[in-house]
């Protein structure tokens, strides 16, 4: 399951100097194609509402094998999203388009990072594909060990 947080529905026109010009629909299509090439499927959701993201994370239990999440601004504020990820216990990868560590200090902290397998940031839209490859490798490793 791929989850996108607030304002990511505006990708393409939102601060293109920071986030690039790829739209969210393009990202979802690209990640879907990349998953299909490896025999996997993805379900993508975006919400501007914290509780809706929590609901999606809870729904992932029993439906998805892993979560790729860009919590956007909630990265830096949301105990609820981190708790939901912890509760479902699925392997999760945190993605950011921008390199948050090279930006304002209030973007340097993440409530989500400690409950994720890892974080990919600073590579723009291609970060989602990198996260997908990483998580599929991980699931394959687990299934053969
Ligand atoms: C972001 C970084 C966050 O700090 C910001 O609030 C976003 C997008 C990123 O993908 O670079 O909305 O998660």
Image (spheres, helix red, strand yellow):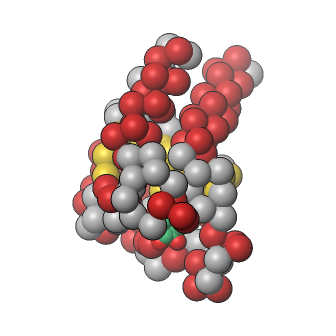
For the C terminus, the image quarter is top right
Give the camera-side residue of 19 and 80: 19
Query: Where residue 117 sits: x, y (%)?
Result: 66, 50
Q: Is residue 67 left or right of residue 63?
A: right
Residue placed farthest to the bottom in the image? 105
Instruction: Report the residue at 50% width, 38% height from top.
Output: 66
**Up-down: is 27 above or below 101?**
above
**Up-down: is 60 above or below 99?**
above
Instruction: Report the residue at 34% width, 65% height from top.
Output: 7
Give the camera-side residue of 78 and 14: 14
Give the camera-side residue of 138 and 39: 39
Quadrant housing residue 106? bottom right
Query: Where residue 5 sits: x, y (%)?
Result: 38, 60
Quadrant housing residue 74? bottom left
Q: Is residue 54 visible?
A: no
Query: Where residue 38 sits: x, y (%)?
Result: 55, 16
For the N terminus, the image quarter is top left
């Amino acid at each position: 399951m791929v989850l996108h947080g607030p304002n990511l529905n505006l990708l393409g026109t939102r601060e293109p100097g920071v986030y690039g010009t790829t739209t969210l629909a393009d990202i979802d299509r690209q990640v879907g194609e990349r998953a299909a090439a490896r025999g996997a499927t993805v379900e993508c959701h975006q919400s501007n509402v914290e509780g809706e993201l929590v609901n999606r994370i809870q729904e992932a239990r029993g439906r998805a094998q892993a979560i790729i999440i860009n919590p956007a601004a909630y990265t830096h504020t949301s105990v609820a999203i981190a708790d939901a990820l912890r509760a479902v216990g699925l392997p999760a990868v945190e993605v950011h388009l921008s390199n948050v560590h090279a930006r304002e200090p209030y973007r340097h902290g993440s409530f989500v990072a400690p409950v994720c397998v890892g974080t990919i940031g600073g590579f723009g839209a291609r970060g989602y594909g990198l996260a997908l490859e990483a998580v599929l490798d991980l699931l394959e490793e687990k299934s053969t060990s």
